[in-house]
Image (cartoon, rainbow, N blue to C red):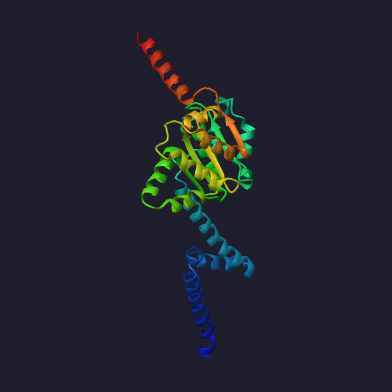
């Protein structure tokens, strides 16, 4: 008599333990942890079996998504937390807000199209690149950010250590590669060639965002090699959005304001 009343309870407890063990074995740790809570909710709210399972797996899916997002964010090496919301379009009327918002839909990634931000220092080229890169990370893409100088240095080191193919594969990998600050400093020995190879192997396959203070007409002289510059521009511009920013420097604006404040304070004190 006792056997028939306690056996189902025992097997229910054992089944619960089994289920938890299955979830842990499958590394569904967040679902395993949520199991008691979801089972309680299922009892109290009289959830259907389907609804309870859905709720349990939703916990795991959300946790996996959060981990992947954090992983992509770490991998991307974005140097600042900037988003498009931080960009003051009113302060930079030279930037077409509609165009930038269209780029932020990430449609350009489907066409393996490129974006070039061209303009003098301080106008927000890096900021817009980072904001778009972040939007790409958030919509699930692998992104990598590097300055042109660091890219050249990395490739140079890899070449010396016999890892040229590995580093080229690395730069071919991300769905979006941001190469920041081309032209600020002369590229080191072999730098233009490394940059060309990176651009060439990504051409028509995946998107690159490039920021530069060198007007396109001056690339040949800036690279010291007109042939490489022309070949690189050819590939970059074949499918590209060129955003020229020639407005006032935001950085200088801030300095200006700072100087004005100091002058006003000095006048008030006098
Ligand atoms: P660039 O890469 O063109 O030299 P940055 O993107 O590094 O310029 O911008 C320089 C500084 O000014 C950064 O701190 C950036 O956040 C700020 N900044 C530039 N443009 C804007 C803008 N339109 N709205 C808000 N901040 C801006
Ligand atoms: Mg910059």
Count of numbered badges drawn on the protein: 0
Which residue of the protein is positioned furthest toward the bottom in this rendering? Answer: 1
Whole-percent x, y for residue 182 in the image: 47, 34
Whole-percent x, y for residue 251 in the image: 46, 26
Q: Is residue 150 above or below residue 212?
A: below
Name the residue at 64% across, 44% down: 107
Q: Is residue 159 left or right of residue 225?
A: left
Name the residue at 58% across, 26% down: 90
Which residue of the protein is positioned furthest toward the top in this rendering? Answer: 270
Name the residue at 47% across, 65% down: 29
Name the residue at 49% across, 24% down: 249
Quarter where residue 132 is shown: top right
Along the line of sight, the residue nearer the viewer: 171 or 86: 171
Whole-percent x, y for residue 42 in the image: 58, 67
Q: Is residue 93 above or below residue 148?
A: above
Whole-percent x, y for residue 219 in the image: 52, 30
Along the line of sight, the residue nearer the viewer: 212 or 104: 212
């Amino acid at each position: 008599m006792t056997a028939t009343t306690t056996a189902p309870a025992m097997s229910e407890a054992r089944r619960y333990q089994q289920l938890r063990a299955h979830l842990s074995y499958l590394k569904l740790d967040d679902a395993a942890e949520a199991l008691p809570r979801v089972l309680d909710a299922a009892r109290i709210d009289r959830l259907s079996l389907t609804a309870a399972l859905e709720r349990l797996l939703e916990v795991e899916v959300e946790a996996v998504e959060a981990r992947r997002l954090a992983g992509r964010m770490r991998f991307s090496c974005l140097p600042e937390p900037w988003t498009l919301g931080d960009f003051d379009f009113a302060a930079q009327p030279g930037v077409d807000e509609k165009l930038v918002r269209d780029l932020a839909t990430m449609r350009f990634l489907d066409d393996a199209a490129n974006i070039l931000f061209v303009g003098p220092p301080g106008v927000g080229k890096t900021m817009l690149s980072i904001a778009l890169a972040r939007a790409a990370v958030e919509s699930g893409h692998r992104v990598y950010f590097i300055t042109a100088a660091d890219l050249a240095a990395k490739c140079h080191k890899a070449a010396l250590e016999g890892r040229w193919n590995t580093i080229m594969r690395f730069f071919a990998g991300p769905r979006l590669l941001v190469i920041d600050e081309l032209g600020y400093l002369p590229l080191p020995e072999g730098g233009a060639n490394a940059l060309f190879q990176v651009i060439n192997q990504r051409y028509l396959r995946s998107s690159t965002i490039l920021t530069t203070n060198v007007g396109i007409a001056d690339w040949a002289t800036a690279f010291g090699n007109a042939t490489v510059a022309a070949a690189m521009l050819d590939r970059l511009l074949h499918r590209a959005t060129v955003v020229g920013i020639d407005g006032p420097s935001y950085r200088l604006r801030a300095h200006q304001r700072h100087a004005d404040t100091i002058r006003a304070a000095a006048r008030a004190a006098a």
